[in-house]
């Protein structure tokens, strides 16, 4: 299966996903940037976390690109991509951003491949 994304004005790849926690009735459509430098599953701003009904799971700390340590809340939730493929994972909650990020754990969980072609301005996710 092939899912087509888009590039934003700064050239970052984005995909449209749906996220929910306890019930699919609370699913929210989200434009998420794919960040290959983010090792986690999904990172959401707090406001989106509250809308999706995510379930509190744990806390963790991680190292930022600039070397600083940061703490975060982890929630259990599910992502639907391309209206049919559902995958669950630990979603980190970010209190300092308004942007959703998909990370490398997401790609591993879907057993997928990310293709970025800047010359043709195409970005695609391939899943088995």
Image (tube, rainbow, N blue to C red):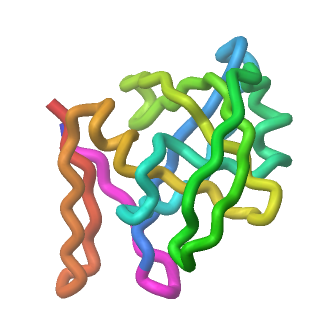
Residue 95, position as x, y percentages in the image: 81, 56
Place of residue 113 in the rendered image (x, y in percent of width and height, measured from the top left): 18, 48
| Location of residue 98 with respect to 42 vertically, above or below | below
> In the displayed structure, does residue 120 sit left or right of residue 94?
left
Quarter occupied by the N terminus: top left
Give residue 29's position: percent from left, percent from top: 64, 42
Identify the residue at horizontal 28%, vertical 65% (top origin): 123
* Residue at x-position 40% and y-position 36%: 82
Give 82 or 70, whichever is nearer the viewer.
70
- Residue at horizontal 54%, vertical 44%? 42
Asked if residue 9 is among those painted magenta in the image, a careful observer would answer: yes
User: Which residue of the protein is positioned furthest toward the left in this rendering?
Assistant: 128
Q: Is 60 positioned to the left or the right of 39 in the image?
A: right
Position of 112 relative to 94 (above/below): above
**Residue 113 located within the stretch drawn in magenta:** no
Quarter occupied by residue 78: top right
The magenta segment is 2-11
- What residue appears at the point 54 percent right and 56 percent down from the top-left corner? 101
Can you say whether 32 is above or below 41 in the image? below
Question: Quadrant of residue 2 in the image?
Answer: top left
- Is the C terminus in the top left, top right, bottom left or bottom right quadrant? top left
Determine whether, in the image, residue 33 is placed left or right of residue 2. right
């Amino acid at each position: 299966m092939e899912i087509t994304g888009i590039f934003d004005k700064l050239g970052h790849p984005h995909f449209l996903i749906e996220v929910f926690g306890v019930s699919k009735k609370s699913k929210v459509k989200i434009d998420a940037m794919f960040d290959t430098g983010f090792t986690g599953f999904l990172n959401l701003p707090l406001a989106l976390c509250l809308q999706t009904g995510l379930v509190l799971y744990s806390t963790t700390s991680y190292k930022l690109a600039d070397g600083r340590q940061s703490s975060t809340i982890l929630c259990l939730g599910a992502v639907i991509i391309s209206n049919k493929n559902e995958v669950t994972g630990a979603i980190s909650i970010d209190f300092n951003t308004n942007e959703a990020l998909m990370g490398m754990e997401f790609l591993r969980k879907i057993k997928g491949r990310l293709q970025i072609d800047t010359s043709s301005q195409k970005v695609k996710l391939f899943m088995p």
